[in-house]
Image: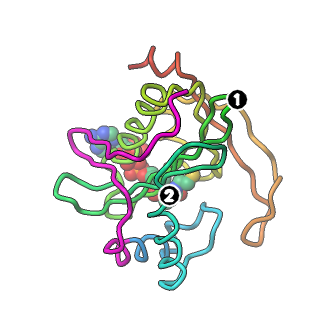
Amino acid sequence: MPLPWDFAPLASDRLRLDLLRPDDLDDLTRLQSDPEVCRYLLYEPRTREQVTEVLARDGAATRLADKGDYVQPAIRDLDGRFLGTMYFALHSLDDRTAEIGWILAPDAQGRGYATEAAGLMLDLAFGELGLHRVYAELDPRNRGSVRICERLGMRHEGHLVEHMWLKGEWTDTGHYAILEREWRANA
Ligand SMILES: CC(C)(COP(=O)(O)OP(=O)(O)OC[C@H]1O[C@@H](n2cnc3c(N)ncnc32)[C@H](O)[C@@H]1OP(=O)(O)O)[C@@H](O)C(=O)NCCC(=O)NCCS
């Protein structure tokens, strides 16, 4: 596996993925403090102070080398406007597996940006990084996120029932995954 990999920007016809920067603080705070955005995320809406810490941590996460390493690039349009963030984490080196996730600002939703950004990450995962499998975990009530997995060709591999006490209720988790050969076959 060609690791370590140091973050390099990714681009499509409409989008650019690059690292979070200190001047993203306003946009990232707007995103991560929004109760609707956070509804199906593992965390509660964050304060500006909390986002300041998160931004410093995530902006410095630039290298994939070991299990647990992650990158959290910003999704931007070609004018540089902040649209949201992607999450991509190495889950296992032996199994060449990573986890993927996505968040879009409300005014950037409904245009296919998250699916397109995830496609860029999957191209990277199964191309340059030589991974075997990428998975996503989500709250099955999060229909927008389920639809992204389906559009990407990810398989629904599991549904854990009330396995997690989260935000005052027992919560289910859906597990979706795609293999390198499946991504290539769909390309
Ligand atoms: C989950 C989330 C990213 C989904 O956003 P989204 O805008 O629906 O996803 P996409 O950017 O892929 O856009 C897909 C939608 O745009 C539409 N669309 C419009 N133009 C499009 C285009 N050119 N290409 C593809 N889709 C397009 C699609 O039809 C689709 O709408 P539909 O699902 O109603 O059919 C968003 O709701 C979100 O950020 N939620 C809060 C954070 C969150 O829950 N993250 C996931 C945690 S698991």
Can you say whether 182 is above or below 66 in the image? above
Position in image of residue 2 (x %, y %) = 50, 29
Residue that badge 1 annotates: 94
Tell me which residue sits at (77%, 72%) in the image. 168
**Residue 151 visible in the displayed image:** no
Q: Nearer the viewer, residue 144 or 164?
A: 164
Q: Secondary structure at mark 2?
A: loop
Position in image of residue 149 (x %, y %) = 52, 37
Asked whether the residues under the numbered discs 1 and 2 touch, taking CB atoms below 8 Å apart as contact, a structural biologist would say no
Q: Earlier in the sequence, mark 1 or mark 2?
A: 2
Q: Is residue 124 left or right of residue 65?
A: left
- Cα separation between marks 1 and 2: 21 Å
Circle 1 residues within 10 Å: few <14, some 14–19, many ≥20? few
Residue that badge 2 annotates: 61
**Residue 51 visible in the displayed image:** yes
Q: Nearer the viewer, residue 64 or 12?
A: 64
Residue 129 belongs to the span the image colors magenta: no
Q: Secondary structure at mark 1?
A: loop
Residue 18 belongs to the span the image colors magenta: yes
Position in image of residue 70 (x %, y %) = 55, 51
Magenta segment boundaries in residue numbering = 1-27
Tell me which residue sits at (43%, 70%) in the image. 31
Position in image of residue 18 (x %, y %) = 33, 53
* Some atom of ligand 1 lies within 8 Å of the CB belonging to the residue at label 2: no
Tell me which residue sits at (38%, 63%) in the image. 20
Tell me which residue sits at (26%, 39%) in the image. 12
Query: Which quadrant of the structure image shows residue 80?
Result: bottom left
Query: Which quadrant of the structure image shows residue 24?
Result: bottom left
Circle 2 residues within 10 Å: few <14, some 14–19, many ≥20? some
